[in-house]
Amino acid sequence: MNPNEPARPIRTFRDLLVWQKAIQLAITVYRVTQAFPKEEKYGLTSQVRRAAVSVSSNIAEGHARQGREFAHFLSIARGSAAEVESQLYLAAELGFIEHAATIAAVSLAGEIHRMAASLAEKVSGH
């Protein structure tokens, strides 16, 4: 973002950079979990995918609300991002995915966690 350009207004949740990154996280998770063993379809594969989808979903739902309620949904999104991180570390330890793929996804989840925390502070008035 160029500091000389005016900030674009936030009209919908799709305008939020944190939501855009959450969508990228979900796409990344779906791609890396394609390599998980078939017997994990209803186990870890399903669990980590649901958690990844939950991040962007909670940001979107929270945006439709105001102030502290939005901050609450951002907190839930942060929890889901942490859940994704934990599950990807487990998948790497089990040998389902390469550690390099884990690092990229976990880095993105961490960035989302920090962005959501910062936004939550702003919208709750703290």
Image (tube, helix red, strand yellow):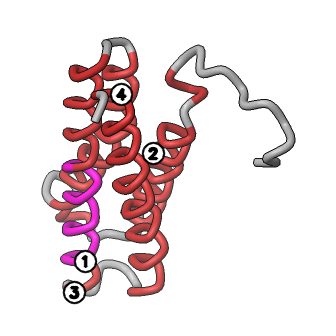
Task: Examine the rendered structure and indicate whether residue 66 appears above or below residue 75.
Answer: above
Q: Earlier in the sequence, mark 1 or mark 4?
A: 1
Q: Which residue is mark 1?
A: 89
- Dot 4: element: helix
Q: Earlier in the sequence, mark 3 or mark 2?
A: 2
Asked where in the image residue 72 lies, by quadrant, the reply is: top left
Q: Nearer the viewer, mark 4 or mark 2?
A: 4
**Which label sits in the foreground, 1 or 2?**
2
Q: Which residue is mark 3?
A: 93
Mark 3: few/some/many CA within 10 Å (<14, 14-19, 20+) = few
Three-letter amino acid code at disc 1?
Answer: Tyr
Distance CA(mark 1)–CA(mark 4) = 31 Å
Q: Which residues lie in the magenta part?
A: 79-91
Q: CA distance from mark 4 to mark 3?
A: 38 Å
Label at residue 22: 2
Say which element carries label 1.
helix
Where is residue 53 drawn, in percent x and y? 34, 40
Q: From this view, report whether residue 32 is shown above or below residue 93.
A: above
Which of pointers 4 and 3 indicates the residue nearer the eye?
A: 4
Q: Position of residue 62 (x, y in %)?
A: 31, 22
Main secondary structure type of the part rendered in magenta: helix
Residue 83 drawn at (x, y percent): 19, 58
Q: Earlier in the sequence, mark 1 or mark 2?
A: 2
Rounded to the nearest angstrom, the CA distance separating label 3 from label 1 is 6 Å
The answer to which of 31 and 105 lies nearer the viewer is: 105
Residue at numbered disc 4: 123
- 103 left or right, relative to 76: right
Give, as a three-letter code, the residue at label 2.
Answer: Ala
